[in-house]
Amino acid sequence: MSSPPAIQENSAFRRWFSRFMYIPAIGGNLIPLVQVEKIISTGRAEDLSVLSILLFTAVLCCWLTYGVLQRDKVLISANIIGVLAWTTELIVVMAYT
């Protein structure tokens, strides 16, 4: 099976898709804020793992660093939002446990 043809560097599709990727990249990294709202509304966070939140935040920091090194605006934007959202969740979980 042959590999698909490469999309040209300056093609309209590639430019459009690069802009489109802000939506899932940033939107996906806002997901922890749903959990934050639930914690605040119920006043409970006992069943959440602080370790998993710390590890995921560390992974996002690695991706943010990679984005900066690559000068990739989508990676930088998405991972700044992700680090902020997961750090917010960590603070809220620690406050409510």
Image (cartoon, rainbow, N blue to C red):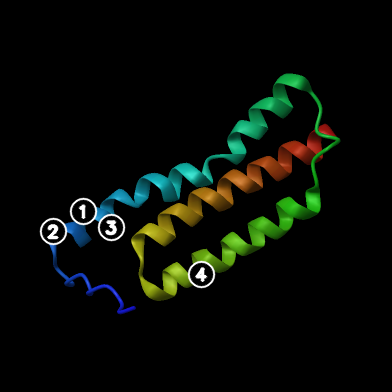
Report the amino acid beneath label 3: Ser
Q: CA distance from mark 4 to mark 1?
A: 25 Å
Percent x, y for residue 74? 37, 58
**In terms of image quadrants, where is residue 12?**
bottom left
Q: Which mark is residue 68?
A: none
Q: Which mark is residue 16?
A: 1
**In terms of image quadrants, where is residue 41?**
top right
The disc, 3 or 2, on the residue closer to the chain's N-terminal end is: 2
User: For mark 2, what is the residue?
Assistant: 12
User: For mark 4, what is the residue?
Assistant: 65
Percent x, y for residue 45? 80, 33
Report the amino acid beneath label 2: Ala
> Badge 4: few (under 14), some or many (20 or more) residues near its Cα, within 10 Å?
some
Would residue 65 be found to the left or right of residue 7 on screen?
right
Q: Do the numbered discs 2 and 1 sit on residues whose CB atoms are within 8 Å?
A: yes
On the rendered image, what quadrant is the N terminus found in? bottom left
Q: CA distance from mark 1 to mark 3?
A: 5 Å
The disc, 4 or 3, on the residue closer to the chain's N-terminal end is: 3
From the viewer's perspective, is the residue at label 4 or at label 1 nearer? Answer: 1
Q: Which mark is residue 18?
A: 3
| Residue 11 vertical placement versus 48 (above, below) | below
Q: Secondary structure at mark 1?
A: helix
Report the amino acid beneath label 4: Thr
Percent x, y for residue 7? 20, 70
**In terms of image quadrants, where is residue 5?**
bottom left
User: Which residue is at 26% across, 55% downward?
Assistant: 17
User: Which residue is at 57% across, 47% downward?
Assistant: 84
Report the amino acid beneath label 1: Trp
Percent x, y for residue 38? 69, 26
The disc, 4 or 2, on the residue closer to the chain's N-terminal end is: 2
Would residue 19 be found to the left or right of residue 36 on screen?
left
